[in-house]
Amino acid sequence: MALRSRQPSQPVFFVPFDISNFQLIPLNCSSVFPFMLFWMGNLLAQNLERNPDHYSSWMARRGPGAVTWLADRVGVGVYFNPFVQWRDKRIKYGVVGMKDLAMDVLTWDRFYLSGRLQKPVHVLVDNWDIRKVNTVNLKMATSSSLLLLPEEFTEYELYAKICSLSYMGDIRMLFAEDKDKVKEIVEGSFQPFQFMYRPLLQEYISEGILKTSTYGQQKAFKQDCGVSATNELFSSLPWIIQRKLQGRFTSNIKEMPIHSVVSSKDMAAKSVRTVLRRRVMVSSARQAVCGVLASGGAVAAQYLGKKMSKAWKSRTF
């Protein structure tokens, strides 16, 4: 694989995936790679040094310092390169430092990459055991979704709610994303969702928080909405959500989390909804600005045009 051979040394997390239709494509396949994420442990700048032609000319001229500054100070730590030629296809991939990835997965500090990893991905390289770390992220996503769901729901509705978390407040959903994106993701990758989340669901069932039933041909659940079960779910959420009850949105990682107790499921759901909407809105806006600056006007306009065209079609047909 030509692209992979030109990556910075010692890649530690390599994930190709089509997020709207879970097609696992081997590296020696000539099919389309519509989206690719690549995470590494070294500095973002190393990718520019090895693959300067992947970057816009004006960013390449400004050098590694500008790339790192733009990703960290303007964006949310990840630098995306769209329209990169690979074989006879064009792909999009992102580069991020492992510290930033791990922080977001464990704390939802920016709730950007963590949201992507709540959906099925195909991991090819994982030298940092990120999949194991990501189980914390998956449990927080499940707990958040249970708090947002009614007492009874289907397995499909659960995965749809998990999938929707990272789009709550996303500015792109207003004009540049398919309105049926969540539906397409869940329907296109239902079995991988099951593989990811069923161990966690079984854990909740054994604890008495969930009970299984059937709804037609679908598997369904009934959850305990009592105060005790609600607090158990709420206590597993990242502290940025728990601190909402104290009216604080700080992201100072030096401050220790304070365990919060909720008096009702509605209160817990309101905290989850408020914090995630704010996080997603800020992160999506920052990353959008970063993308425009990184790609340059012409490339950014081309990419946005394609996204808006797809979004428009989803709203008119």
Image: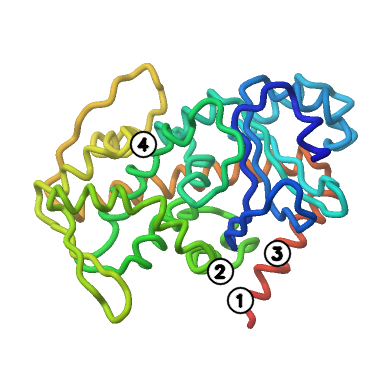
| Disc 2 target residue | 179
Q: Residues within 10 Å of mark 3 (few under 14, many from 20)?
A: some
In the image, is 69 to the left or to the right of 139? right
For the question of whether residue 73 can be seen, the reply is: no
Which label was assigned to residue 315?
Answer: 1
Residue 244 figure quarter? top left
Q: Residues within 10 Å of mark 2 (few under 14, many from 20)?
A: some
> Marks 4 and 3, Cα distance to the nearest angstrom?
34 Å
Which label was assigned to residue 308?
Answer: 3
Q: Residues within 10 Å of mark 4 (few under 14, many from 20)?
A: some
In percent of width and height, residue 219 lies at 29, 70
How is the structure coloured here? Answer: rainbow
**Of circles 4 and 2, which is in front?**
4
Please tell me whether mark 4 sits on a helix, a strand or a loop. helix
Are the residues tagged 2 and 1 within 8 Å (C-beta)? yes
> Marks 3 and 2, Cα distance to the nearest angstrom?
11 Å
> Marks 1 and 3, Cα distance to the nearest angstrom?
11 Å
Identity, as a three-letter code, of the amino acid under mark 2: Lys
Which label was assigned to residue 68?
Answer: none
**Of circles 1 and 4, which is in front?**
4
Q: Residue at x 80, y 54 (%)?
A: 301
- Nearer the N terminus, badge 3 or badge 2? 2
Identity, as a three-letter code, of the amino acid under mark 4: Val
- Nearer the N terminus, badge 1 or badge 4? 4
Please tell me whether mark 1 sits on a helix, a strand or a loop. helix
